[in-house]
Amino acid sequence: MREPRRRVPAVGVLALGVLMAACGFFDRGASPADTPDWAALRERMVRTQIEARGVHDPLVLEAMRKVPRHEFVPEGVRNQAYADSPLPIGESQTISQPYIVALMTELLEVGPGKRVLEIGTGSGYQSAVLAAMGVEVFTIEIRSRLCQEAARRLDSLGYHTVHVRCGDGYAGWPEEAPFDGIIVTAAPERIPEPLLDQLAVGGHMVIPVGAFYQELKVITRTPEGFSERSVIPVRFVPMTGEVERRD
């Protein structure tokens, strides 16, 4: 026969509750001691994920140490902001893993006073990294909600050299061309001609190209035309909009 369940006396429950409260079981608020050391996490990210893989541009490394990546991801994944992986930002889009952001930024070969066009603003993190390097950024995002949120976020964090446009990035930003660099954070199957036209001589375009199998490419404009090299295999979300109708 099963023994009848013993009822815990009310006074025992009260005592247990007092003990748990004293130990902090009911305190879910974030105290200063609970707040992550974001700067230390960024330093570790740069050291173990970026420098260790061969990114050495001091401007890029310093920007990656400065920009608060955790401010550019949803609250639900904020504790993973400095992990070695992409993270969802909504609308089936992602923020690239830190190494890829740093690598693409280094491949642009830009610095203070340069002007860069970005296609695919996302959460605004890549724009912020470039702005932290003293670059003036013109960035276009096709998804209106992401675009508006990124514009507000960049402004509130003080990245005032970033200009945000909501719309299709296929045609670029011709009235501000030419650009010293162009960075594309979504993959077309072939490189949009208008973007090539807006690249300054001597400038680099860093872009993932392909459908399922993608290559990160660097396109350099020379006085004679364009040169192209592949860097590494990558996996980006596909570029959408006008580019789909052109392919």
Image (tube, helix red, strand yellow):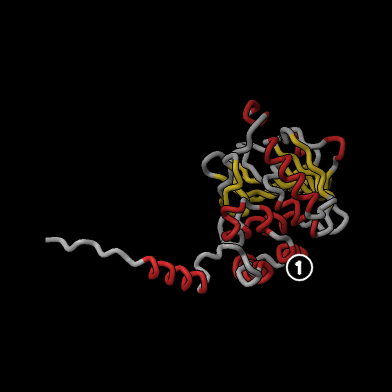
> Height in image: 50 above or below 219?
below
Left or right side of 227 for 13: left
Q: Is residue 227 visible?
A: no
For mark 1, does the 10 Å Cα neighbourhood hold few (<14), some (14 to 19), or many (20 or more) residues? few
Seen from this angle, which residue lies furthest top?
245
Q: Quadrant of residue 241?
A: top right
The image shows residue 62 at horizontal and vertical percentages of 75, 66
Where residue 52 appears, as percent x and y from the top left, is 61, 70
Between 149 and 161, the one nearer to me in the picture: 149
In the image, 97 versus 206, the foreground residue is 97
Residue occupying image coordinates x 62% and y 54% = 231
Residue annotated with mark 1: 58
Q: Amino acid at mark 1?
A: Pro
Residue 121 coordinates in the image, percent (x, y): 71, 44
Q: Residue 38: which quarter of the image?
A: bottom right
Q: Is residue 156 above or below residue 241?
A: below
Work out whether residue 127 or residue 200 is closer to the camera in this orientation and state it: 127
Quadrant for the C terminus, please: top right
Q: Position of residue 23 (x, y in %)?
A: 50, 73
Number of labels in the image equals: 1
Judged left or right of residue 194, residue 230 is: left
Residue occupying the point 66% across, 45% down: 185
- Image quadrant in which the N terminus is located: bottom left
Look at 63% across and 37% down and name the residue there: 239
Camera sees residue 74: yes
- Which residue is at a point 32% across and 66% down the rendered structure image? 8
Indicate the secondary structure of the residue bearing disc 1.
helix
